[in-house]
Image (cartoon, rainbow, N blue to C red):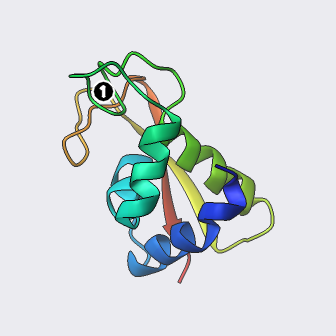
Amino acid sequence: MEFIEIQDQLLFVLQQGNGMFRTAYQIFINLRPDTRDKLIREYPVVSGRPIMGEGAGIYYSPASFIAHALAYFAKNNDRIVQGFIDSQNVRFEGYEPGFRGTTSIWAWKL
């Protein structure tokens, strides 16, 4: 999948957040089901493992793709705001970040 294929959905999800920050995990959950399925197919994990985050066993996941896409789009759109949180001991929509440290969060500037 190319970043441009998901741009409209990512921007829509951010805009629906009314200025609230969301993680890539939370944004993933709010994508259309067909897009989520396509991302899952492109970043497969061993059966029985979570599709992303801690325990997935993969470095680049749907959440990684979303964060990289948003960083790319933010270069030309000042309404996409990036922030960071300490992701130690947190879960988002049932997903625990695979990297325990700084995790990006995203919002649409109102």
Q: In which quarter of the image is residue 79?
A: bottom right
The amino acid at mark 1 is: Gln
| Horizontal and vertical percent position of residue 26 | 34, 54
Is 95 left, or right, of 68 in this rendering? left
Q: In which quarter of the image is residue 11?
A: bottom right
Q: Give the vertical position of 83 relative to 13 (above or below).
A: above
Q: Residue at image x 38%, y 69%? A: 20
Picture mark count: 1
| Horizontal and vertical percent position of residue 66 | 54, 49
Q: Give the vertical position of 10 relative to 26 (above or below).
A: below
Residue at the disc numbered 1: 88
**Mark 1 Cα-neighbour bin, 10 Å: few <14, some 14–19, many ≥20:** few
Residue situated in front as seen by the camera: 56 or 44: 44
| Horizontal and vertical percent position of residue 47 | 26, 22
Q: Which structural element holds mark 1?
A: loop
Q: Residue at image x 35%, y 31%? A: 97
Residue situated in front as seen by the camera: 44 or 18: 44
Residue situated in front as seen by the camera: 94 or 99: 94
Residue situated in front as seen by the camera: 102 or 7: 7
Q: Residue at image x 62%, y 56%? A: 70
Whether residue 56 is visible here, answered yes or no, is yes
Is 21 left, or right, of 9 in this rendering? left
Q: Residue at image x 64%, y 45%? A: 68
Whether residue 23 is visible here, answered yes or no, is no
Q: Give the vertical position of 102 relative to 79 (above or below).
A: above
Q: Give the vertical position of 16 relative to 53 (above or below).
A: below
| Horizontal and vertical percent position of residue 29 | 32, 57
Is 55 left, or right, of 69 in this rendering? left
